[in-house]
Image: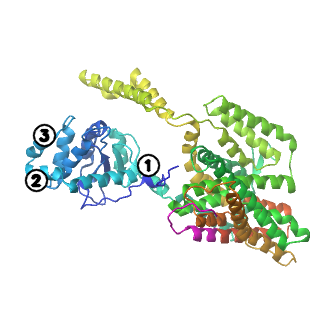
């Protein structure tokens, strides 16, 4: 997780192309595709990309606009900064691209005498060129491009942006031509990447689907919506342990994948991030406890008699919607705050599950405890044995999920348990991987050159043994850069954000807004739940956190202010599906709809308050809440 710019922001070009400043080859038009290249004149890979760009210009003609920006790596390529300044000195006489072509054509090292020779060859005023080469203006121009590149997440050259979105595809001619020609598939892929690069995109999709569910549940299509969500889908015979409604599959099945990602994020933060200090890690645990006790007490202050059984309804926080709203707020949210809220919400969910099992049991089957423990121990054993293959974890996780469900516990928690057991690997040394990849590519390059000398078709190389050998080695080197946990997180994250969470939101928030307030307890139930969520949740979280920090039992995450704490505590008042389930189990059929409506109302108010508190930007500091 990035601590400076959100990783999604680095997919987008932060500084737009400026015709008065940037070096542009080609004429911009509605039909043209714009490629911004951060390059280094002495970088061998930038030089190898030059023939590809020449072929692309020949194929696309006026539809290709090329924009050059400097990113000299003086440490790796001594003299790169001097070459960049030389091109800018030439630009002051209107000869940037002529000098660029000369610099890329020269073999390094390139000295000042070589630069003067090139300046004379392209018709520059050599004395003016020499003065500009050492001038502050030229140095500042190169440094500005370098700073822009770093802010944009550029770490090496060449780094390309196509129509404002970072290009992470292959650099060969046919791969780039496919991306630049904009066939339907490429346009769809680019549009998806542009939308996903927006820091608010996932949260917005979640909120839109939640509103859509409310519309479906309160209009003429409500019967159809209820039939779909209540339809029974079974793995095996109907009525078996794995016979669930569509709503339950989304809640316990799909949401397990989301819990896996949240668990991986918490684990990473506990290892190297905001929760690495044990006192920072214990803070969300204590805050979650306070966030359960306070709303329960507030509810009980409003309700006596049979209605007291609903005390647990305002204690549950919806992790999906809370983190979704944090995503909507984007870079206003410090990394440490998101980690704190994610950890708090996971602890809150565990407490909610225990509350359901102990106080509102319906189908609790203690005999499945041994199956849960056995599956958990197997995952731990795989981790300890450094098992890196995916299928053992998948098989045992499915057993764990089924066992938790049969036990009567929210099976989505299997995702958290799996996240804690997925193996990581020490970061590899770059040298051996570079040698492996370079050897594979050099072998292909030699085979290609030999084919040209013999007059053979290059396409036949795919049938040669060297091709398959090189592909295996390149795949192995690439795979070693990420641990199994990281590979799973990258593969699953887009599905979680744009499929799993929206499906869950669509199934969970479709609650009827009609309720009967005629019973004598209805008003008190509504008030107890709504006030418990809006006031009790943040009050309990803030009091528990404040006492823990004051007693030096815990420390706040770095960069999190008091206002951040207050806003996050308010967002934790967003109730979830467990709260709705508790309403069904704790209250009579007449009062349960009132309780559900109170959960929606309290959650809406809590979400608005939290968003209003967090939406302003401030300079980060670290006070005690």
Report crowding for label 3: few under 14, some 14 to 19, many 20 or more residues within 10 A (C-alpha).
few
Residue lying at the far front in this picture: please name it: 551
618 part of magenta stretch: yes
Q: CA distance from mark 2 to mark 3?
A: 15 Å
Given residues 339 and 579, the one toward you in this image is 339
The residue where tag 1 is placed is: 185
583 part of magenta stretch: no
Q: Is residue 121 something one can see in this rendering? A: yes
Q: Which residues are magenta?
A: 607-625
Is residue 270 shown left or right of residue 375?
left
Given residues 28 and 113, the one toward you in this image is 113
Tell me the SS state at disc 3.
helix
Colour scheme of the picture: rainbow
The residue where tag 3 is placed is: 113
Residue 9: percent from left, percent from top: 45, 55
Q: Nearer the viewer, mark 3 or mark 1?
A: 3
Q: Which mark is residue 128?
A: 2
């Amino acid at each position: 997780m990035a601590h400076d710019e959100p990783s999604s922001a680095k997919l987008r070009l932060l500084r737009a192309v400026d015709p008065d400043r940037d070096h542009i080859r080609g004429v911009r038009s509605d039909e043209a595709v714009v490629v911004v290249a951060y390059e280094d004149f002495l970088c061998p890979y930038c030089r190898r990309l030059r023939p590809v760009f020449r072929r692309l210009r020949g194929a696309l003609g006026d539809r290709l606009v090329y924009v050059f920006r400097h990113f000299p790596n003086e440490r790796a390529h001594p003299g790169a900064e001097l070459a960049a300044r030389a091109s800018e000195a030439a630009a002051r006489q209107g000869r940037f691209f002529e000098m660029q072509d000369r610099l890329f054509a020269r073999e390094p090292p390139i000295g000042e005498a070589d630069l003067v020779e090139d300046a004379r060859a392209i018709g520059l005023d050599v004395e003016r060129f020499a003065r500009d080469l050492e001038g502050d203006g030229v140095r500042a121009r190169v440094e500005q491009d370098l700073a822009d590149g770093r802010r944009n997440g550029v770490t090496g050259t060449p780094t390309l942006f196509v129509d404002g979105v970072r290009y992470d595809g292959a650099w060969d001619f046919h791969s780039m031509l496919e991306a630049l020609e904009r066939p339907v598939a490429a346009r769809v892929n680019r549009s998806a990447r542009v939308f996903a690069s927006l820091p608010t995109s996932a949260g917005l999709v979640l909120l839109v689907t939640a509103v859509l569910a409310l519309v479906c549940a309160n209009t003429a299509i409500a019967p159809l919506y209820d039939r779909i969500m209540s339809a029974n889908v079974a793995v095996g015979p109907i009525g078996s342990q794995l016979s669930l409604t569509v709503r339950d599959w989304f809640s316990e099945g799909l949401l397990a994948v989301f819990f896996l990602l949240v668990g991986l994020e918490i684990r990473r933060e506990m290892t190297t991030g905001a929760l690495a200090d044990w006192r920072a890690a214990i803070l969300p645990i204590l805050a979650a406890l306070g966030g359960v006790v306070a709303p329960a007490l507030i509810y009980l202050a409003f309700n006596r008699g049979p209605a007291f059984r609903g005390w647990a309804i305002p204690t549950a926080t919806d992790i999906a919607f809370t983190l979704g709203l944090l995503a909507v707020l984007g870079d206003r949210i410090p990394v440490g705050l998101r980690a704190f809220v994610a950890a708090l919400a996971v602890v809150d969910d565990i407490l909610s599950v225990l509350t359901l099992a102990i106080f509102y049991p319906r189908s609790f089957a203690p005999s499945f405890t041994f199956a849960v423990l056995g599956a958990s121990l197997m995952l731990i054993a795989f981790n300890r044995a450094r098992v890196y293959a995916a299928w053992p974890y998948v098989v045992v996780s499915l057993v764990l999920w089924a066992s938790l469900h049969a036990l009567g516990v929210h099976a989505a928690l299997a995702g958290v348990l799996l996240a804690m057991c997925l193996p990581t690997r020490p970061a590899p040394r770059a040298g051996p991987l570079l040698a492996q990849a370079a050897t594979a590519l050099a072998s292909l390059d030699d085979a290609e050159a030999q084919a040209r000398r013999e007059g053979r078709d290059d396409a036949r190389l795919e049938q040669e043994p060297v091709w398959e050998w090189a592909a295996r080695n390149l795949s192995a080197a690439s795979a070693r850069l990420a641990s199994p946990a990281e590979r799973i997180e990258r593969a699953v994250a887009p599905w979680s954000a744009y499929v799993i969470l929206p499906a869950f939101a669509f199934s969970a928030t479709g609650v009827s807004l009609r309720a009967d307030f005629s019973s004598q307890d209805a008003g008190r139930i509504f008030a107890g739940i709504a006030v418990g969520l809006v006031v009790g949740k943040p009050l309990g979280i803030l009091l528990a956190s404040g006492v823990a920090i004051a007693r030096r039992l815990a420390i706040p995450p770095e960069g999190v202010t008091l206002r951040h704490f207050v806003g996050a505590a308010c967002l934790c008042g967003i109730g979830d599906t467990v709260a709705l389930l508790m309403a069904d189990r704790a209250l009579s059929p007449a009062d349960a709809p009132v309780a559900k409506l109170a959960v929606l109302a309290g959650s809406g108010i809590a979400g608005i308050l939290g968003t209003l508190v967090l939406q302003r930007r401030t300079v980060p500091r670290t006070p005690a809440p």
